[in-house]
Amino acid sequence: MIRYRWMYLLAVPGLLYFLIFQYAPMWGILLAFQDYNPYRGFWGSEWVGFENFRTFFSYGDFWPLLRNTLTISVLNLLLSFPAPIILALMINEVRTEAFKRITQTVVYLPHFLSWVIVVSFTFLFFSLDIGFVNKALASVGLEKIPFLSDTLYFYGLLVGQTIWKEVGWGTIIFLAAIAGVDPQLYEAATVDGAGRLRKIWHVTLPAIRSTIVILLILRTGDILNVGFEQILLMLNPMVQSIGDVFDTYVYRQGILSGNFSYSIAVGLFKSVAGLILVAGANFLSKKFGEEGLY
C-alpha cells in the first residue's frame, strides 16, 4: 500500500465527492420520522416515529400508485432493457466501418436531449390538433386519434420515448462487452459451419451473459423509479388514473403541499424497496450460477 500511495491519492477527490454530496445529505432521511416544521427546524420539530409511513400505507391511492409504477417499470424492463442488446448485436454485424460509426453516433444523440425536448417532439407528432400523425390521418379521410389523452396509448408513448432516447446510449456497454469476445470462438464456429445468427446465439450472447445479468440486477433497483420528469410532462387529467406514480406523488406532497416529512418517508420507502430488490436479484443470480454484484 505504501508503494502505491501516490496512486491512492488520485482516489481522494472521488472519495470526498461521495462523502460530501452522497453520504453527508443522508442525515435528511431522519426527517421521515418527524413532523418537520421549517420554522422550528430539525431540532425543534416533533418526532412521530413511523406515523408518516402508516399514513402512506393507509392512503387510499397507495395501491393505484404501486400498480401504475410497477406497470411502467415492468414494461420498460421487458421492452426497453433488451433493446440496447439487440441494437448492439445488429451494429456489431455491420462490416462497413464508416457506416457503423455513423450509425452509433446517430443513435447516441437522443440521449443528450432533455425530456422537455423529447416530450415536445411527442406533442409535435401526436397531438390532436397540430400533430403530424393526426394531420396525415385526416388527409386520407380517417378520424383523428387522441394519442395524448387516451389511456390506451399512454404506456406505449412512455416506453417508446424511453427506447428512442436511451437505446443508443445503452449499447455502449454491450458493444464494449462484445468487443472483448475471443475471435477464436468465432473462427471455431465458422469452421463448424455456423452462420451469423448461430454465432450470435451460441458465441456472442453467452459471452456477454454476465454483463446482461449485472445490468439487469442494477435495473431492478430502479423498479420504483420510473422517470419523474418524463411522466410529469406527459401527465394530464385524462391519463392521471394510470399515469400517477410515486415520483409525481412525492412531488405534489413535498414541493406543492409542503409535507416534507411525509414525502421523505415515501422516498425512503422507495429506496428501501429498491435495496431489497437488488439484494434479492443478486441472490437469485448467484443461486443460478451467474456472477453477482458482490
Image (tube, rainbow, N blue to C red):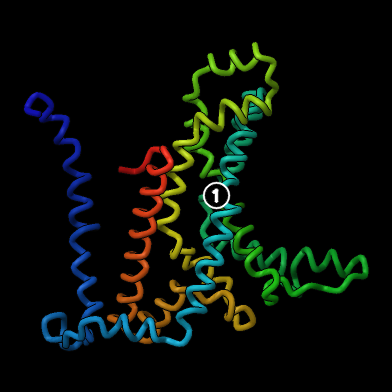
Element on which disc 1 rests: loop
* Percent coordinates x, y for residue 259 in the rendering: 32, 85
Q: In this view of the protein, which residue sits in the foreground, 83 or 275?
A: 275
**Outermost residue to the left:** 2
Q: In this view of the protein, which residue sits in the foreground, 12 or 1?
A: 1
Can you tell which quarter of the image residue 74 is in? bottom right
Q: In this view, does 9 lie to the left or right of 117?
A: left
Residue shown at 45% from the left, 36% from the top: 210
Can you tell which quarter of the image residue 145 is in? bottom right
Find disc 1 in the rendering and name its residue: 81
Can you tell which quarter of the image residue 76 is in? bottom right
Q: How many marks?
A: 1
Residue shown at 37% from the left, 68% from the top: 270
Is residue 5 depicted above or below 130 in this figure? above
* Percent coordinates x, y for residue 198 in the rendering: 66, 26
* Percent coordinates x, y for residue 52 in the rendering: 29, 83
Q: Is residue 142 left or right of residue 31?
A: right
Q: In this view, does 73 lie to the left or right of 51?
A: right
